Amino acid sequence: MMNVRTAITVLSVFFLSLFAKAQYTIHKMINVGYVYQNQSFGEIGGRLLFLKNDDVIYRLGGSALMGSANSQFAIMPKLQADVLLNFEKNVDFYHSYYFLAGVEGTNKYVAPKIGVSLFGILDLTGGYAFAMGNAGLNGKKMEGLNINFTLNIPTVFIHDMFK
């Protein structure tokens, strides 16, 4: 558990030092989705989106994965970091899709991932999860194919809906 805390601290300091040099706009988002990681999970959480221009976008987030493993309900915390890229210029529908690369980690596995994002709101990613030691969830090993389908809802949008 101490290694996970150390890794989170180092990553946080690294990302915060990157953002301290330039002025990035920060947007808050709520995310809901589906995760397949050797078992089906529902996901709900929050993300921070950092952008200076629309070509490269950084996202950091935390969420909870909820599902049933070996017929027992389980909840896993998840941290994630993504980079969204789109360098296409002079298109009619400006920056409608982004290529996504990132990593997600729980207390049971770490999974690098790649995928696509539509407007930065609808994500479809896939990767491979590597189990952390012998950590399992209710006796089930969390290793193998990792698929994510996520809807990111900007909180500004929610605020504007209820005005």
Image (spheres, rainbow, N blue to C red):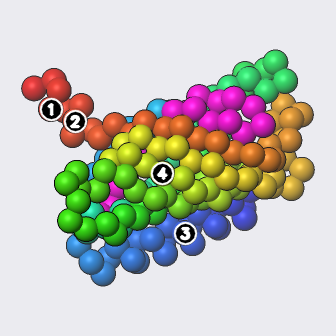
Answer above or below: position of 72 versus 117. Answer: above
Q: Earlier in the sequence, mark 2 or mark 4?
A: 4
Question: Which residue is identified by label 3?
Answer: 11
The amino acid pointed to by label 3 is Leu
Q: Secondary structure at mark 4?
A: strand
Q: Secondary structure at mark 1?
A: helix
Residue farthest along the bottom direction in this orientation: 21
Q: Earlier in the sequence, mark 3 or mark 1?
A: 3
Residue numbers of the magenta segment: 33-51
SS class, disc 3: helix
**Residue sitting at 84 percent across and 31 percent down?**
138
Q: Nearer the viewer, residue 143 or 127?
A: 127
- Pointers 3 and 1 in contact (CB under 8 A)? no
For the residues carrying marks 3 and 4, which lies nearer the camera in this image? 4
| Image position of 159 (left or right of 12) | left
Asked if labels 1 and 2 touch by Cβ distance under 8 angstroms, the answer is yes
Q: Nearer the viewer, mark 4 or mark 1?
A: 4
User: What amino acid is at disc 2?
Assistant: Phe
Q: CA distance from mark 3 to mark 1?
A: 33 Å
Residue 116 is tagged as 4
Looking at the rendered structure, which numbered label has been put on residue 160? 1
Residue at which label 2 appears: 157
Dominant SS type (magenta): strand
Q: CA distance from mark 4 to mark 1?
A: 27 Å
